[in-house]
Amino acid sequence: MKFFFIYFFLLSIFTIHAYEPSPVENKKTKELEQVKVTAQLGKQLDLNINFVDSNGKKVVLNDYLKKGKPVLLSVVYFACPTLCNIHLNGVLDGLKELEWSLGNEFEYVTISMDYNETEKQAKPKKASYLESYGREGADKSWHFLTGKKEKSTDCDSALIPLL
């Protein structure tokens, strides 16, 4: 549980850092009009949800918690043209400023909430962010995961109210 508190603290710092006011008026897209959030108070995340990593290997969230390090967690679309990239870019900027490095002090798990995405989308997304991050060992500590519809929505339902 302490891992998630650390994640939310760092996420809030990175999100504030990533925000830059825009002179362009923000308009809600047709896709965003369909977005809804339902409170899931008290619900805990199933750490045995099955995912596939960017190399096509089957994994569960608990695999990353067993390492004894804090785990940052983001739920995004890998093909998202706007908000998800803004979020990941903001996190990346924050990670670059930290003295701590991925792999040494913590892990970072990025999960696609689009069940149509596979390792084919995850692998190049991961490669792009790792190249920009530029620190040794991050490839083994920044995980980009995809899942099946029923499992991804289980994870989304548990996480989105917390974000």
Image (cartoon, grey):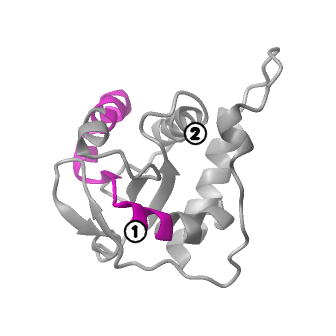
Location of residue 99 in the rendering, given as x and y in whole percent from the top left corner: 45, 46
Q: Residue at x 30, y 37 (%)?
A: 121
Q: Judge by depth and name the residue closer to the eye, 81 or 125.
A: 81
Q: In the image, which disc is placed on residue 77?
A: none
| Quarter the C terminus occupies | bottom right
Which residue is located at x 57 percent, y 36 percent?
A: 90
Task: Give the labeled residue for mark 2.
Answer: 87
| Range of magenta residues | 125-154
Expressed as whole percent of the image width and height from the top left, the position of residue 92 reads 48, 37
Whether residue 82 sits left or right of residue 24 in the image: it is left
- Look at 31% across and 35% down and name the residue there: 130
- Say if 114 sits above or below 73 in the image: above
Q: Name the amino acid type tagged 1.
A: Lys
Check the image and report above or below for 125 versus 46.
above
- Which type of secondary structure does the marked residue at label 1 adopt? helix
Residue under label 1, please give it.
151
Lateral position of residue 37 relative to residue 157, left or right? right
The quarter of the picture where residue 146 lies is bottom left
